[in-house]
Amino acid sequence: MVSEYLKLVEAEIKRQPFGSQPKSLYEPIRYIMALGGKRLRPLLTLLAYSLYKPDVGKIVKYAAAIEAFHNFTLLHDDIMDKAPLRRGKATVHEKWNVNTAILSGDVMLVRVYDMFLDMDRDLLPQALTLFNQCAAEVCEGQQWDMEFESKGNVAEAQYLEMIRLKTAVLLGFSLELGALLAKAPPRERIALREFGTHIGIGFQLKDDLLDVYADKKKFGKQVGGDIIANKKTYLLIKAKEKARGKDKRELAHWLQAKKFNTQKKVNGVTAIYNRLGIAGLTEKKIAEYFDKGFQKLESLPDTPHKQNLIQFTQDLISRQS
């Protein structure tokens, strides 16, 4: 079923013209949308809708709109992060230029609203209200993430709130939108949103863990990139909390070093994490959020479609890349 939904999403993305002239404005949109990815968010929308109605083809356009919004955020994030690559290909600001990437992102967001406009008039105001709240929260999360870069210490609660906003609320909205379009009971819509938000936090924590401990052959990007960049992930935050004596001095050395061998830094910080049991602490926190998420689904009726949603999520949880 998920593979069929993915085909629907990909076909809809290819069908969307986004715009034509000037070509240099619209070609970057088609470029980033064609780079692929898991299409996690539109698939969650279709899976949530399928809990209540079988005709998922009717809402694929709105699911694709969420994917367009997600890619708009990536396009602008890449500018802020000065990232050279996205999914193994040149980022838009590298392939074109920063000004084009900014404008393409701006019009991309406009096109998201265009894709929503032919929605059922009874549902459109509520859908747009929920979307606008989610979009604002994603921006808030990104701003916190940037501010954390220059902040000496970030508390665990601050970090978890940042990833809730930057990453998790969009997963929650994706599910809630599918339920809203199916006219599901409000209580069940909220349960699906909270499910998505909790698993979204769990996914980001797992990304933090994989960045340090993933199999290099499966990960698809540089293992230890967060360590090299001194990124304030959950692992670093917990290490700074727990480190004492020699571990504290070594960690401070690596965080303050301006010139270093990247592999030595990755190995050195990872060794500190190992001595402090940081991987185990992170795995415990990941499990906590996944458990919270699945508990929210218990209030929904047991159906084969509910099992499809659970299985899809569990497959993502067990990934190693």
Image (cartoon, grey):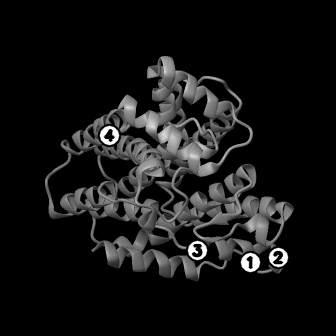
Give the residue pinned by disc 4.
283
- Report the Cα–Cα distance between label 2 and label 1: 6 Å
Q: In which quarter of the image is the N terminus?
A: bottom left
Q: Mark 3 points at which residue?
A: 35
Residue 256 screen position, x and y as percent: 68, 31
Mark 3 vs mark 2, foreground winner is: 3
Q: Which of marks 3 and 1 is nearer the N terminus?
A: 1
Which amino acid type corresponds to the residue marked 4 in the rendered image?
Glu
SS at mark 2?
helix
Residue ID at (45%, 27%):
238
Tell which circle, 3 or 4, labels the residue nearer the N-terminal end: 3
Say few, some or many: other residues with alpha carbon within 10 Å of mark 1 (under 14 / 14 to 19 / 20 or more).
some
Badge nearest the viewer, 4 or 1? 4
Q: Mark 1 points at which residue?
A: 27
Q: Is residue 9 left or right of residue 312?
A: right
Which amino acid lies under the numbered mark 1 shown in the image of this protein? Glu
Q: How far apart are marks 4 and 2 (CA)?
A: 45 Å
Q: From this view, report whether residue 204 is shown above or below residue 11.
A: above
Circle 2 residue:
24
Asked if labels 2 and 3 touch by Cβ distance under 8 angstroms, the answer is: no
Direction from residue 298 to residue 158 in the image, left or right: right
Discs 2, 1 touching: Cβ within 8 Å? yes
Quarter holding the C terminus is bottom left
**Gap in angstroms between the C-alphas marked 4 and 1:** 41 Å
**Label 4 with label 2: CB-CB less than 8 Å:** no
**Which residue is found at the position 42% from the left and 78% from the top?**
8
Q: Identity of the amino acid at label 2? A: Ser
The CA distance from mark 3 to mark 2 is: 17 Å
